Amino acid sequence: MSENIPESIPTSMDPQSHRPNKKRALSPSSAQAAQVASLMKHPDRYVSTAKTREKKLAPPPEIVANVQGSSAGAGSGEFHVYKASRRREYERLKMMDEELKKEKDKEEFETKTDEWKKKDDAKTAKNRAKRQKKKLAQEKKKERERTGTPQVEDAENDADDASGGADGNAAGSTGDAGPQIKLLKTASTSNGTSSSSGAAAAAPANGNRSIVIFDDD
């Protein structure tokens, strides 16, 4: 304002001006806060949560008076009729494309949802089996500690698997391997006798491990 005259006062600051004040551009958070504030201003007001209506075209007229032939052109007198029919046809094609796009998006979403659900179910089942296995092992350990029995069953199974694998490899490599040495593991029972799995002869009872040499011939 160079001079103190009415002409030098801006229109936005003039009290006699009825022009609305310019509003600043709101950020998304500010716009949402304003919407929530206006919504909570009247808490007793009913808020409609109905679904949006699907867009539908007007049904075609029952009687069409101005039907043009295939060889007729759009003259100056009938150009508005041609434009209206073209607009209706474009709207119909656009709606068909939108419906097709919605169906494709829905199918893709359902496919992805099924894949995610299968992955989650597989992961959950794997974790469940792991937890059950751990729980069973803990229960077996507590039972052994309570009864005082040594952990022999698992070691016997491991030894049998190892010996069986070694025998299979030896038999597969050569037909006549000569004398074989087999490692046996015995576990003392309650009556003091010793037992061995898959042994050709009884093992001595002076130790837990013994070596038996025998010939297949």
Image: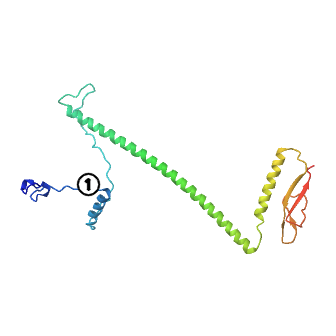
Task: Name the residue rendered at 47%, 50% in the picture.
Answer: 110
Q: How many marks?
A: 1
State the residue lying farthest toward the bottom.
Answer: 146
Amino acid type of the residue tagged 1 in the rendering: Ala
Residue 184: which quarter of the image? bottom right
Q: Does 175 appear above or below 11?
A: above
Q: x%, y% of residue 62?
A: 25, 39
Q: Does 94 appear above or below 35?
A: above
Residue 46 vs residue 102: left or right?
A: left
Q: Split into 4 quadrants, where in the image is the N terminus?
A: bottom left
State the residue lying farthest toward the left.
Answer: 5
Q: x%, y% of residue 75?
A: 20, 28
| Colouring used for the render | rainbow
Task: Name the residue rendered at 88%, 47% in the picture.
Answer: 177
Question: Which residue is tagged 1?
Answer: 25
Query: For this rendering, which residue is in front, 39 or 53?
Result: 39
Secondary structure of the residue carrying tag 1 is: loop
Q: x%, y% of residue 35?
A: 28, 60
Q: Does 194 appear above or below 72?
A: below
Query: For this rendering, which residue is in front, 186 or 70?
Result: 186
Task: Name the residue rendered at 75%, 74% in the picture.
Answer: 147
Q: Estimate how packed mark 1 is, as few (under 14), some (14 to 19) or many (20 or more) residues with alpha carbons within 10 Å.
A: few
